[in-house]
Image (tube, rainbow, N blue to C red):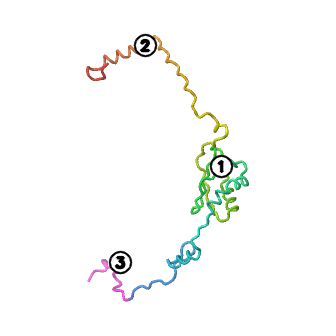
Amino acid sequence: MADASALRLLPPRFLAGPRTTKPKRSIGKALRRDGREPLGLGAAITMMTERGLVAPAAGGSVLAQWESILAAAAPELAGHVTAVKFDADTGRLDAAPDAPAYGTKVRWIAPKLIAAVNEKTPGANMRALHALAPAPMKASLATATADPTPPPPTPTAPRPVPSAGYRRALEAHRQAVSRCRLPGSGPAR
């Protein structure tokens, strides 16, 4: 028989002996963190067929109404910020400002713009507004009618002739370097 000190080192399950009954599985339904019950595959397929597999086409309406929403929510930005892309799955709208200052203004009033978009387009469910890098300037009438050929290159000024003192110093340097080098160790002149 094992001594008492050795038995104390064993885990309790070894001391209890063989198990006579199996543990019972819980039959209750597990809840997700948000309180919903998990959905089975059949129920999910039924739900999708009842809804007709139709996702709301809010992306097109947000992009189509962007100018009017922007004019109502922030008139100072109208015409200076362009909606580029709306992702309906994540609720993110990408907007390209004309200049960095407009991008900063968009970031500052993003909550107001998000609320305006959700009010004007109820199915959009916009959650984030991302200001992209400034877009290139739009072609105006003046730049569109301008001559596309570049101006002729301006001639470059000739290099000034070095002074006599500079030439003497450069020659002294070259002689000092040539005395320090061993034959065949440097580039040939």
Label 1 – label 3 distance at C-alpha: 69 Å
Q: Amino acid at mark 1?
A: Val
- In terms of sequence position, does the residue under pointer 1 or pointer 2 come before the other? 1
Q: Quadrant of residue 52?
A: bottom right
Q: Position of residue 164 (x, y in %)?
A: 45, 10
Residue contact between numbered discs 1 and 3, judged by CB atoms under 8 Å = no
- Inspect this view and state whether residue 38 appears: no
Q: Residue at x 64, y 39 (%)?
A: 144
Residue contact between numbered discs 2 and 3, judged by CB atoms under 8 Å = no
Q: Position of residue 149 (x, y in %)?
A: 57, 32
Magenta region, residue range = 1-20
For the N terminus, the quadrant is bottom left
Q: Which residue is identified by label 3? A: 11
Comparing labels 1 and 3, the label whose residue is closer to the camera: 1
Q: Residue at x 49, y 18 (%)?
A: 159
Q: Which residue is identified by label 2? A: 167
- In terms of sequence position, does the residue under pointer 2 or pointer 3 come before the other? 3
Q: Residue at x 65, y 65 (%)?
A: 123
- In terms of sequence position, does the residue under pointer 1 or pointer 3 come before the other? 3
Asked if 77 appears above or below 182 in the picture, the reply is: below
Q: Position of residue 22 (x, y in %)?
A: 39, 86
Q: Amino acid at mark 2?
A: Arg
Comparing labels 1 and 2, the label whose residue is closer to the camera: 1
Q: Amino acid at mark 3?
A: Pro
Q: Position of residue 119 (x, y in %)?
A: 70, 62
Comparing labels 2 and 3, the label whose residue is closer to the camera: 2
Asked if 89 appears above or below 96 in the picture, the reply is: below
